[in-house]
């Protein structure tokens, strides 16, 4: 299935998110400039680029944690930037996994995965529990349902955060450097879960420094520098014959490390 997704022409599929001419300034500092890209159903998009290039700000705009200064974001052809947008309902469809997990520290693992379903999706307790258990099983966290976040390792916390996002059954999942805060020995378990999601056909946008993940798992790679998209293409082309000088420099720095 993964192979099919990777080789199928992207633009023959339905666009889920369309970003047009998106710009974002903080005061006089323009941190995103004229960003254009489209996310199709089943895409696994990696966003790569140096620190400070605007990757997090872009994801935060897509998740409505920041308001763009200019431009348009269409979710399933609907403009999400208009006044009166139901933000919690939108965020249930476009979930986000953060570098720092952001679990509710006063709730058990199970409760972390139930509460959004009850509050936002208005699911009953039984249905929310059933769903939470299903996704906790998927990320290998069933044995820890009664634990509190402080009792878990970083890798386990991130897997719970992924289960919590999945339990909302989103259309798209955004990941902002999901493995950057982890001890090296825990990176693999989180990447494995993300690979499984990709194989299952979950649409994902992943900001990452894991070049092997970007190359092997995603079907589209976006390279950003100084608030602009310098280059975007399928991973084979971007990693083997980058056209843009800045992409070439970035990749050669990575390969030297
Ligand atoms: P990346 O995720 O690629 O490291 P960011 O999106 O976090 O980059 O940041 C891009 C630029 O925007 C940086 O120069 C950063 O300092 C600036 N920036 C990010 N958030 C804010 C903010 N809330 N206020 C002011 N500047 C910000
Ligand atoms: Mg960032």
Image (cartoon, helix red, strand yellow):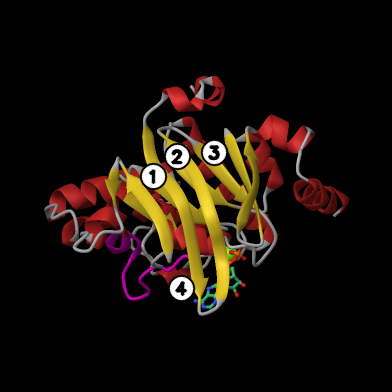
| CA neighbours of label 1 inside 10 A, class few (<14), some (14 to 19), many (20+) | many
Real-space Cα distance between discs 1 and 2? Answer: 9 Å
Query: CA gap, disc 3 to disc 1?
Result: 15 Å
Residue 135 screen position, x and y as percent: 35, 45
Residue 13 highlighted magenta (yes or no):
no
Tags 1 and 2 touching, CB below 8 Å: yes
Magenta: main secondary structure: loop
Query: Which range is magenta?
Result: 101-112
Of the residues under marks 1 and 2, which one precedes in the sequence? Answer: 2
Give SS at disc 2. Answer: strand
**Coordinates of residue 244 in the picture (x, y in percent):** 76, 44
Q: Mark 3 vs mark 1: which is more N-terminal?
A: 1
User: SS for tag 3?
Assistant: helix
Residue at the disc numbered 1: 172
Earlier in the chain: of badge 4 and badge 1, it is 4
* Label drawn at residue 39: 2
Residue 157 is labelled as none
In the rendered structure, are the residues bearing label 3 and label 2 in contact, judged by CB atoms less than 8 Å apart?
no
User: How many C-alpha atoms fall within 10 Å of the one at disc 3: few (<14), some, or many (≥20)?
Assistant: some
Whether residue 195 sits left or right of residue 115 in the image: it is: right
Chain-order first, disc 3 or disc 2: 2
Residue contact at pointers 4 and 1, CB within 8 angstroms: no
**What is the tally of numbered marks visible in this picture?**
4
Disc on res. 150: 4
Q: Quadrant of ligand 2?
A: bottom right
Magenta span contains residue 104: yes
Beta carbon of the mark 3 residue lies under 8 A of ligand 2: no
Q: Nearer the viewer, mark 3 or mark 2?
A: 2
Label located before the other in sequence (3 or 4): 4
Observer-side mark, 3 or 4, equals 3
Q: Which mark is residue 195?
A: 3
């Amino acid at each position: 299935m993964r192979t099919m997704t990777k080789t199928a022409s992207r633009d023959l599929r339905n666009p889920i998110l369309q970003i047009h001419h998106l710009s974002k300034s903080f005061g006089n500092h323009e941190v995103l400039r004229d960003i254009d890209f489209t996310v199709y159903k089943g895409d696994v998009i990696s966003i790569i680029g140096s620190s400070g290039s605007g990757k997090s700000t872009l994801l935060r705009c897509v998740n409505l944690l920041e308001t763009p200064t200019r431009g348009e974001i269409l979710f399933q052809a609907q403009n999400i930037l208009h006044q009166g947008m139901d933000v919690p309902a939108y965020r249930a469809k476009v979930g986000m996994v953060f570098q720092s997990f952001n679990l509710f520290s006063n709730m058990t693992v199970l409760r972390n995965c139930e509460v959004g379903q009850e509050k936002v999706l208005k699911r009953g307790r039984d249905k929310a529990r059933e769903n939470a258990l299903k996704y906790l099983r998927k990320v290998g966290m069933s044995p820890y349902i009664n634990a509190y976040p402080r009792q878990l390792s970083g890798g386990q916390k991130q897997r719970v955060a992924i289960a919590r996002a999945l339990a909302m059954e989103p259309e798209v999942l955004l990941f902002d450097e999901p493995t950057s805060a982890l001890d090296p020995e825990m990176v693999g378990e989180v990447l494995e879960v993300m690979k499984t999601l990709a194989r299952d056909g979950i649409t994902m946008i992943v900001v990452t420094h894991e070049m092997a993940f970007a190359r092997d798992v995603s079907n589209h790679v976006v390279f950003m520098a100084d608030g602009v998209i310098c280059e975007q293409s399928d991973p084979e082309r971007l990693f083997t014959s980058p056209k843009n000088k800045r992409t070439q420099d970035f990749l050669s720095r990575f390969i030297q490390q």
